[in-house]
Image (spheres, rainbow, N blue to C red):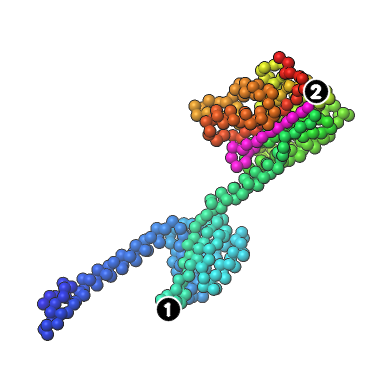
């Protein structure tokens, strides 16, 4: 006959086979059960998300357990949260409709998942992704609720930034010309390729009082604020451009840039933003192009009787840096076959895999090879060469261009 502690079967006095479970077996089963409980407790304690358990059988559904992560998230100690209603995390910015949704779910004994603004003990707001699940006993009666809470403030901020960038993109797109422009012997086309979701570049061309206006600009920053600022600049520029008429011969590009700087200085200076801009006006009757520069890249002029490009250079500071600034204005006479290229530094400062810059010299040579090509085709060809130079890598900065062609008449030649 074996002892009970062996846990082995033995034969009784009547010869009957008796199976004895054994104390050792009971102890082993209980140990496994306790180990599982301890593992569960350690896992909940070590979880990176906040976890709380409330007693649904008690009035006001008091909190009976919180893990360390929830204390860390909220700034309240475990003792400060126990036996409390976690409504204490709510504040003035908490959406009342979300609070009501939680209350309704608790009253109905069901789970819910919401995101709401909560407040830490020090008053700092954070976005809380809350998942509430009901717990029932073996008889099916609701006994507890488990809340799993995660701080999703950074994710929420990223979503809001993406939304803002989408708004900025829509604003920026609305500012740009919808199609190339063709007037008599003039052809103009442009493009703006943001390096990211939205860029700071801007260009425009429009016709006022038998005069072609062309502008290219770069505003610091890539945000909704920058896009809204550029929208204001566009409206102000067009308003100033329409003021000009034959009775105001002095209201040229330099005066318009000066007016822009005076009107926008306070807003730009207060927001730490600035704008570089090149603005020019072409009078087809006089064949005269007048231009002024506010710290922007100098456009390239490919004259019909020349095989090399020249820069249209004038003195002028970027808009928004100083209130006391003057802008130089120059004028040139254009002939049939002449071409003008306005561009931003995203082109010349583009780099290949070896770190070499695309540069003004390379851009000038390529532009000179496009003499007989339309403005749109010129832009397409220059972009193809730029992408080839960068080895297919994404551009590091916004890329914008505007091309003006003074068309040759039938039978005319470039003249060299």
Instruction: Decide which of 416, 20 is in the foreground and name it.
Output: 416
Query: Residue drawn 87% across and 28% down?
Result: 246
Q: Quick one: label 1, few (<14), some, or many (20+) residues within 10 Å? A: few
Q: Secondary structure at mark 2?
A: loop
Identify the image quadrant of residue 413: top right
Q: Position of residue 284 (x, y in %)?
A: 81, 26
Q: Which residues are magenta?
A: 185-200
Which residue is drawn at the image coordinates 68% and 41% (left, top)? 172
Residue 63 in view of the camera: no
Q: Is residue 279 above or below residue 125?
A: above
Query: Who is closer to the viewer here, 190 or 66?
Result: 190
Labels 2 & 1 near each other (Cβ < 8 A): no
Q: Which mark is residue 139?
A: 1
- Along the viewing direction, whichever of 408 and 69 lies nearer the viewer: 408
- Of all residues, the one furthest to the top in this rendering is 416
Question: Which residue lies under the disc numbered 2?
Answer: 287
């Amino acid at each position: 006959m074996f002892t009970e502690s062996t846990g082995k079967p033995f034969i009784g006095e009547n010869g009957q086979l008796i199976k004895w479970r054994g104390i050792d077996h009971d102890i082993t089963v209980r140990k496994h059960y306790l180990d599982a409980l301890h593992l569960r407790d350690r896992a909940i304690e070590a979880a990176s998300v906040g976890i709380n358990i409330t007693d649904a059988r008690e009035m006001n559904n008091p909190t009976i357990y919180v893990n360390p992560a929830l204390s860390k998230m909220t700034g309240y100690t475990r003792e400060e949260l126990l036996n409390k209603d976690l409504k204490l995390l709510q504040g003035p910015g908490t959406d009342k409709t979300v609070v009501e949704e939680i209350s309704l779910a608790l009253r109905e004994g069901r789970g819910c998942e919401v995101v709401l603004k909560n407040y830490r003990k020090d008053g700092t707001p954070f976005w809380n992704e809350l998942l509430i699940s009901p717990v029932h006993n073996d008889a099916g009666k609701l006994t507890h609720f488990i809340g799993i809470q995660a701080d999703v403030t950074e994710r929420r901020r990223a979503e809001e930034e993406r939304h803002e960038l989408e708004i900025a993109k829509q604003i920026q797109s609305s500012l740009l010309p919808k199609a190339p422009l063709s007037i008599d012997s003039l052809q103009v086309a442009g493009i703006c390729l943001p390096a990211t979701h939205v860029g700071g570049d801007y260009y425009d061309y429009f016709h006022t009082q038998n005069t072609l206006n062309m502008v290219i600009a770069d505003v610091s920053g890539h945000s909704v604020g920058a896009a809204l600022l550029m929208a204001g600049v566009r409206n102000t520029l067009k308003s100033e451009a329409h003021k000009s008429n034959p009775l105001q011969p002095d209201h040229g590009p330099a005066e318009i840039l000066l007016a822009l700087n005076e009107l926008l200085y306070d807003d730009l200076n207060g927001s730490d933003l600035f704008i570089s801009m090149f603005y020019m006006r072409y009078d087809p009757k006089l064949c005269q192009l007048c231009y002024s520069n506010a710290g922007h890249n100098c456009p390239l002029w490919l004259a019909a009787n020349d095989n090399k490009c020249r820069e249209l250079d004038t003195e002028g500071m970027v808009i928004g840096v100083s209130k006391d600034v003057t802008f130089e204005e120059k004028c040139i006479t254009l002939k049939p076959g002449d071409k003008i290229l306005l561009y931003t530094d995203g082109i010349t400062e583009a780099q290949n895999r070896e770190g070499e810059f695309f540069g003004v010299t390379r851009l000038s040579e390529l532009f000179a090879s496009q003499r007989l090509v339309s403005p749109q085709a010129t832009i397409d060809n220059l972009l193809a060469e730029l992408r080839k130079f960068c080895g297919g890598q994404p551009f590091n900065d916004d890329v914008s261009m505007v091309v003006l062609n003074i068309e040759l008449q039938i039978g005319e030649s470039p003249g060299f």
